[in-house]
Image (tube, coloured by chain):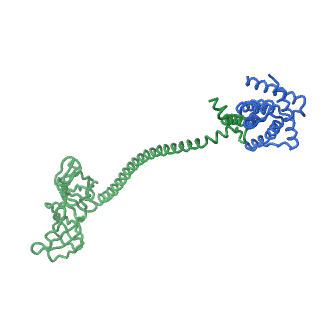
Chain colours: A green, B blue
Amino acid sequence: MAHLLTERKPYLLLLVLLTLNLGLMSSRIKSAGQRSLLEEAVMSLISPFLKGAHWAGQGLSGTWGAYVDLRGVERENHRLREQIDGLALKAQEAEESRQELVRLRELLDLRDSVPWTTVAARVIARGADGSARIVTLDRGSHDGVRVNMPVLTPRGIVGRVIEAAPGASKIQTILDPNSGVAGLIQRTRVQGMIVGAGERGCRMEYVNELSNIEVGDVIITSGLDQIYPKGYTIGIVASIGEGEGLTKLVELRPEVDFRRLEEVLVVLKPEGPPERSASR
Amino acid sequence: MRIVRGVVALAAAALAQAILSRYAPSLARYCDLFLIIVVYFGLTSPPAGAMLMGIGAGLVEDSLLGSVLGMNGFKKTLIGYLVGSFGSLFMLNQPIPRFGILFAATVFDPVAELGLSLAMGRSFVFPATLDLLQRGLGNGVLGLLFFWIAARLP
């Protein structure tokens, strides 16, 4: 190697020696930035690699940061979803409470207007077939509930008590085909018998063919059945047809929405006329 | 042996240059004993020997003058290479060609320094022409005297 440098390739030796001298010089000569020329030369040579490494590092760091951020975002997203679910549930509960409050206020208003003692009850069950012909309340004989007591809502009458257990009672609604309510047309005072027609509603029977009845007329209780107090809404005339013999067949739509029946008032009505002085 | 002679010559030149600078500074301005030694080795040795002598002489000169270490080393290495290459191509054992080589090397020295300074962004005052001629003349005459003495050494 030495032979090659000294005899065959002297310019290689020259290159080495000159480079050595340049290195020595650059180590002594400081640039404006107080760096030796050797350092600057080395920096110039390696700076592309450093830049590349920096770029790669930044890219990697950025990617990692984005990944970590995404993980964070995912966690936050999950947390926010849970929070939204919780808030939605709370909002639902609040809305439910608000609606219940409205219903109970209406029920309270009704209670104040009824001249008998009443007890508020909740519907806890429906008929086995899911219909609202028979419903069960959470109040029973322990609360004073007795058979044949009428059940009301602010919209109108619901039905009557057919069974009264100590803690619950069974109600036959006016939708039940076996039920019967003495009613009258509020506008013309024409009387008839309201019979349940299942889920389709009710119909009014024994209405004279010559009676003045129109669709939209309000039908209220007449009180003649000795069960339901007089003057409470039963429903609206939906259609008028021909009945048997000289009668009309009046179909009516109950005012009470039995599909959404939740709270009711059981009128602890004694036999006989109402006693307004009765304790509430 | 050649290396020993080179080291001795280098030491002697350093000593003489130091003495001249100390006791005859005006004379020292017109002679560069390190340059003379490098030219001598360039003419009498292969280029590699001349270059090694060049870097050695240059670094010693840098140390003595307190200049940037490597500046004279660079110049003297380059001069050693050029003279060695030139000497291997031509017969330069006569006084006049040798004088010419010494003169040319003297002129080349500040030229090389100028180039280096420009490359490194350093300021450099190129010597006046007369000054440069006087220095070339001094190195030429002293160099021929050195060559005559060296030729008679064992």
Q: Nearer the viewer, residue A215 or B151?
A: B151
Image quadrant containing the N terminus of chain A: top right
- Count how many numbered circles sit on residues in the image: 0
At which x and y percent is residue A253? 22, 66
> Does residue A41 show up?
yes
Q: Looking at the rendering, which quadrant does residue B145 occupy?
A: top right
At which x and y percent is residue A12? 65, 36
The residue at 76%/33% (across/down) is B43
The residue at 26%/52% (across/down) is A122
Q: Looking at the rendering, which quadrant does residue A187 occupy?
A: bottom left
> Does residue B71 show up?
no
Q: Nearer the viewer, residue A218 or B80?
A: B80
Q: Nearer the viewer, residue A74 or B89?
A: B89
Q: Residue furthest left?
A: A245
Residue A257 as seen in the image, left or right of residue A245: right
Work out whether A139 lies above or below B61.
Answer: below
Image quadrant containing the C terminus of chain A: bottom left
At which x and y percent is residue B71? 75, 36
The residue at 79%/26% (across/down) is B9
The residue at 20%/46% (across/down) is A166
At which x and y percent is residue B50? 73, 32
